[in-house]
Amino acid sequence: LPLCREEAAAVLESPSAARRAAVPPQIAAMPASALSPNPRARSRSPPRTAVLKPGSSLQGLTALLLGLERRPDRRQRGEDMLAKEVPWLRTEFFRATDGKLDTIQDDEVAKTWNTKNNSNYGAYEDVMDKEGKLLYSAAQFAVPGVDYEFSPGERGCAHSHYRMWQRVLAENKPMLILEDDVQLVFERTCGGPSSGATFTERFELGMREAVERRAEVLYLGWSGHRGGNYKHHEE
């Protein structure tokens, strides 16, 4: 995609050889606040641009808006913003698993995780204790990796996305996954405003390329932190 380094980026994940039969990408996943670089940018309101009608690759697309039932304020804000900026997008609220209230089976979401795989996508730094003593070096986060326990909220978030993937599998069609603090309107760090129109234009380009590459996932996210922390791998 023709994106500058410090704005929303799409990362295409190619399917394994055993799964080449899948033609369109099954999920377009956007993490929470992925398109809003910082809290101050989120509050700015750049000039409105005309609503851009989607092309054929986006027509009929449904977005699952993930949120906790006990946070109706976040749901309302997200739904209102999407209805205003991308009225072509059908949105359905998806109840998130509440890690503090709901039971999560260990065979669905583990209680611990390791940083080794994460290190392929972002740079870690040395971690010190309060006295300045080294706890973990940057190299340790990659090999052998550092084990952390999931918080209840993290397990709930992971389980929510696990359930959403199951939903997409059952639907057997492309869907867009959003969290309820998604933001499309902000001042881009490389200059110029972001809006529903710019999102639609770039999302359209990403979906076209995803179909051409027979990709299964189109990941949408902002990559401007520290000048872009995604490590691209040719393979």
Image (tube, rainbow, N blue to C red):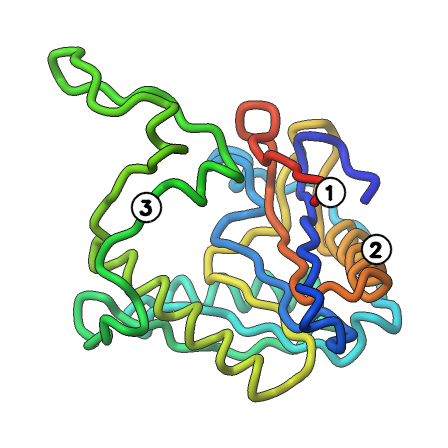
**Amino acid type indicated by mark 3:** Asn
Relative depth, front residue between 225 and 65? 225
Q: Where's residue 188, x and y in %?
A: 67, 34
Name which quarter of the figure residue 128 lies in: top left
Q: Where's residue 136, x and y in %?
A: 26, 25
Relative depth, front residue between 75 and 232? 232
Name which quarter of the figure residue 146 lies in: top left
The quarter of the rendered structure image containing the N terminus is: top right
Q: Where's residue 53, x and y in %?
A: 85, 66
CB-based contact (under 8 Å), mark 3 and mark 1 = no
Q: Residue at x 67, y 56 (%)?
A: 13
The dot on residue 114 is 3
> As drawn, which residue projects farthest toward the left?
131
The dot on residue 47 is 1
Secondary structure under the numbered disc 2 in the rendered image: helix
Q: Residues within 10 Å of mark 1 (few under 14, many from 20)?
A: few
